[in-house]
Image: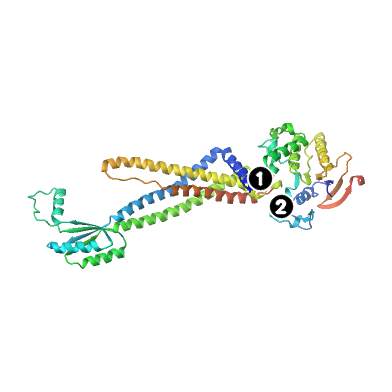
Amino acid sequence: MINYLNNHYQAFLSGFSRFTNNIGASMMMIVVIGITLCLPSAGILLIENAGQISKNIEHEAEISIFLEKNISKDQVDFIDLNLKKNSLIKKIHFEPKLIAWEKLQSKLDIGVNASVSTNPLPDAFFISLNTLDEIKIKKLINKLDGIDGIENIIVDGNWIKKLRIALSLGKLSVIFLAVLLIIVLLVVIGNTIRLQTLTYRDEIEVSKLIGATNAFIQRPFMYTGILYGLGGGIITISILKLSVFGLNTALVKLVSIFGTDIVFKDLSPKYYLYIVVLAMLIGLISSYISARNSIKRLKIYK
Amino acid sequence: MPGELVFVTGPSGAGKTTLLKLISALEKPSSGSIVFESQDLSQIKDKDIPILRRRFGMIFQDHKLLYDRDCFKNVALPLKINNMTKADTYRRVRAALDKVDLLQKERIMPITLSGGEQQRLAIARAIVSRPSILIADEPTANLDKEYAEEIMNIFYSFQQVGVTVIISTHELPSTKINFKRLQLNGGAIQNLISYDQLP
């Protein structure tokens, strides 16, 4: 076991020395990996934030219930009781027609002597739902429609549904983009490792001649690949962190102008761990395949 | 036989290098068999070849040294492959360098050494893992007569301590020592005779 670990330690040192021997090329490689992985990661960041917004909106989705104009107080109480009993309804807000009319007048700046002198507005209930399930909402509307005194029901959640579909499509696009970019990275890292095997051709040849196994020769290249991935992962995280910081700094100004409460949320540490592990895996796999093929193909002592 | 010194001779294209490659499992025979310590090398599995090669010390005409590292590291390479400890590596490399009279140059880069010294360094690398057979492919081909003799004397000294030495060469040594000559021609063994049977 100690021998095995020592073997890997020696291979890591060789891999690290190859990484640092050509530090310029190594830095370029990790920047390429970093920027390439940044694209799907930024997509995930955007989708996570958009998803968060849609989640918040979901809980505030409303149905507006407009009552008949000449409805009695008892009928209003009966409807209120019915709504309170329903488990799909999270929040109920009753807006009497007089208050609604006052609000409208103040908003539109309609004077007391304006041409519209009588209140055209009905009493209304505004309810928030626990769900966006179309079937459940339809059932609820049918149920409410049967109650006396209800004139009109307006569902206010279709655009959220569209947003959610757009988000799922966005997620699919990010996955597709990520797969494509991972293939690109596998090829780019693989090619760099292949060039490295040519640079270290003498060492490989001599090592093979004096009894080194292919695995022994391959190992330092694999560690170099892992280091490329690690460096690339760190670059990706740095770019994402900087972007989130920059966006939030800009949003602070918007908040002060519009008085809204918008914060661009950073990815959780779990995602950052995934990015680094994925980058290292890409480095490992591409260097393994590339070094294995190059070493196998190398003809020694001709 | 163990402890023998064998010179493989023959004109260019006779198959000297091919024979050495077959012995060291660098090539597989298309027919026939090569037996080393009761093991038929023609039947050897690919995964066992590196382990077999570690039992041979190989010396090449062009030395096959690594010019980006010093003499010590060149000689230490087979021990690194054998996963030897640092202390043992240090001791063995210095002993090997001492044997070929290069101890004082252990931290020098091989490119600064003369042809003879480079070949001695290659020998140090070949003997550092204490192989049972030394295989040398025309080790003196590119050397002056003086250096060539020096190198041959080192091989004789290994034979004296029981190491089997197989050397391919165009010319037999003038030194009166006990050896066998394997004459090849056109890819076939012409004869195998001992030193005292030579004309």
Residue drawn where x is 34% and y is 56% of the image: A164
Q: Is residue B36 left or right of residue B191?
A: left
| Secondary structure beneath label 2 | helix
Residue in the picture at 77% in, 38% down: B142
Instruction: Please say whether residue A152 is visible from this viewpoint.
Output: no
The amino acid sitting under disc 2 is Ile
Give residue A204's mark.
Answer: 1
Would you place residue A68 above or below residue B120 in this image? Answer: below
In the foreground, A127 or B169: A127
Which subunit holds the residue at mark 1? A
Q: Amino acid at mark 1?
A: Ile
Answer left or right for A272 relative to B55: left
Q: Is residue B39 left or right of residue A120?
A: right
Count neighbours of disc 1 (C-alpha within 10 A) and say few if under 14, some if 14 to 19, many if 20 or more. Answer: many
Q: Helix, strand or loop at disc 1?
A: helix
Residue plotted at (47% across, 46% down): A36
- Percent position of residue A229, x then y: 52, 46
How far from the left and from the top, in percent, is residue A67? Answer: 17, 61
Percent of width and height locating residue A136: 30, 64
Which residue carries the number 2 mark? Answer: B49
Tell me, yes or no, if residue B88 can be seen here.
yes
Q: Chain of mark 2?
A: B
State the image quarter where residue A95 is shown: bottom left
Circle number at residue A132: none
Q: Nearer the viewer, mark 2 or mark 1?
A: 2
Task: Pick whichever, A199 or A230, lies toward us.
Answer: A230
Q: Is residue B97 above or below residue A75?
A: above
Place of residue A205 in the rendered image (x, y in percent of width and height, measured from the top left): 68, 45
Q: Among all residues in the image, which is located at the extreme top?
A: B104
Colouring chosen for the image of the structure: rainbow
Q: Give the quadrant of residue B162.
A: top right
Judged left or right of residue A129, residue B11 is right
